[in-house]
Image (spheres, rainbow, N blue to C red):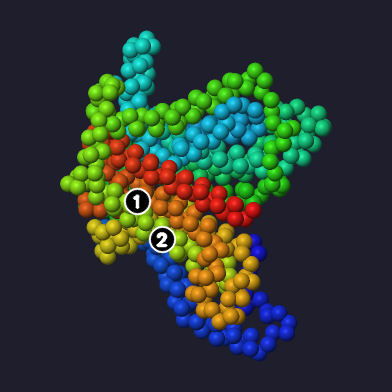
Amino acid sequence: MSEISFPGSALTDRPLAQGTSAGSRLFRRLSALQPARFLVIGLSIAILLALVAYPLALLTGYSLIDAQGHVTFDTFEKAFARRGMWQATVNSGWLVFFVTMGACALGIPLAWLVARTDAPGKSLITLAAGISFVIPTFISVISWIFLAAPNSGYLNKIATGYLGFSEAPLNIMSFTGLVFIEIVGVYPLVFFAVNAALNNIDASHEQAARILGANRWRTTLTITLPMVRPAILSAIILVMLDALSSFGAPAAIGTMANFSVITTKIYDLLKFPPQFNYAAAVAMPILIVTAISLLIQKYAVRAENFRTLTGKATPEQIVKLGHWRWVAGGFCLAVALVTAILPVGALLLLSVLSSFGAPISLENLVGKHYALIFDENFAARASILHSMLLALAAATVCATLGLVLGWVVERFRFFGRELISFLVMIAYGFPSIAYAVGILMGYVNLFYGTLTLILVAYAGKLLPIAFVLVRNGIQQLSTDLEEAARISGAGWLRSIKDVTFPLVRGSVGIAWVLVFSLSLRELSMSAILAQSDTQVMPTVVLQFIEDGAVELAAALAVIIVGVSLSMLAVIRLFTARKTASIS
């Protein structure tokens, strides 16, 4: 990554061009004294430390003290000696293993079919993967309860009533059901990563293998797949971390099936009276596994000794499946049906069905659940307002901080700039529930029972998304226009407002929309930080599920999914406009 600096920065280490006048040197000194620049940058860095460094330091510290405040390592032993804790840890381990295997078994073949074959239905798979990724797993639980509950699920009713099954073949309320739901939610990570890598492979490598006599299948196995190994490894690590930190689906299904995982145990430890030291001790192994996984990803990918040229699959690379083409198309259709069409359809139907288990008929289709959701005397209506306010605030905070910090990292060269990037990105790798524990420890006395506490967590956790997008936009900009504005007498804030921001407005807009959408559906941190007066839509959905009011949960979930899909459409619009402006 090239480093960019410009005249007027007191921290730049690039010498001025030959012939620099005394007036230019004076300009540098005067510009270095602009208080607005250092006030904004200093405040942004202070906010970053408060959002990330402080809560994570507290989390580490609390794991090393006992109830009396004494430093000890016994906290770990006592925490994991609690009833059911080791079994929950084992359950988490099996969940990570099975979900990772299942996501790879589904995502890699689908990516290959879409990128390298003439199978029909490829666009349907891409759309289905996008929908599966947008819908949170705790919402997928609602759909699959409707479809595959042991006795009342409609697929089970069809199986026993029309297909000759003597007993219900499906049971979503089980550990196996949880594994299935998690696979459906995370296989898009593998699919999109591998599909992108396959599309970027230089065709000459595969063509060389064909010239030397290798057939298409041998070329695929010995050339193509090894070349996308970094993408597969990165996707595997993301899937593992997602499964390890998953909370919504395990909380919903575990309550009904009577089992726990490590994240739900952390949640239990924070119920009244909260036991911060034990919760921190249980969260620390998650943080350690996360850090190790990210290091493995970094160095394993760096160790790859090949590079490929960005390209696109050529006609010679497309595998003609022949008679197997329609088998592959049927597989694509089945995946789309199970992972997207059935869940979305079930969610919509359940939200207007008079009661769970009622026959599907026109007289049983009602709108009372939505009417109750929007009743001003019902808690769900307040949760919608809270979610919208938090999403707006989090998106604005993250986009603003991302712009300032991205500018600092890309325009200044000074000791500590990499530390800023590290602090921004480290929270992204940590599981949400562990990060929320640190936020609760650090700010419970200041913001207890307020939306501000949840906003702090949202901002710290989602800041990396805005930072990466805006920083990438700033990297593409020349400093010439900024220099011209500064030489013309514009202050730092004026140059940012009139020059830099308009040029990266597309990246900032995409970041804002993406953070808004993710804030709207965030459950893990909200479940720990929300109180009775600060409930948000995901926590109310989870409460409805636990109370058995799945029709109300479905109605509120439809609102979340609808807004999330709308935000996805806005992102595509932003991207299309940005691409059009570049071309």
CA distance separating discs 1 and 2 = 19 Å
Q: Is residue 93 above or below residue 273?
A: above
The secondary structure type at the circle numbered 1 is: helix
Q: Amino acid at mark 1?
A: Met
Instruction: Sort mark 2 into few (<14), some (14-19) or many (20+) by Cα contacts within 10 Å.
Output: many
Q: Where is residue 191 shown, x and y percent of the image?
A: 55, 37
Q: Nearer the viewer, residue 149 or 521?
A: 521
Q: Residue 38, which numbered label?
A: none
Residue 467 visible to the viewer: no
At 74% from the left and 39% from the top, the residue drawn is: 203
At 46% from the left and 45% from the top, the residue drawn is: 568
Q: Is residue 71 above or below residue 286?
A: below
Residue denoted by label 1: 525
At 49% from the left and 39% from the top, the residue drawn is: 130
- Work out which residue is located at the far bottom of the displayed protein and give it: 22
Residue denoted by label 2: 396
Residue 353 visible to the viewer: yes
Q: Where is residue 218 shown, x and y percent of the image?
A: 72, 29
Q: Is residue 456 above or below residue 46?
A: above
Q: Nearer the viewer, residue 293 or 404?
A: 404
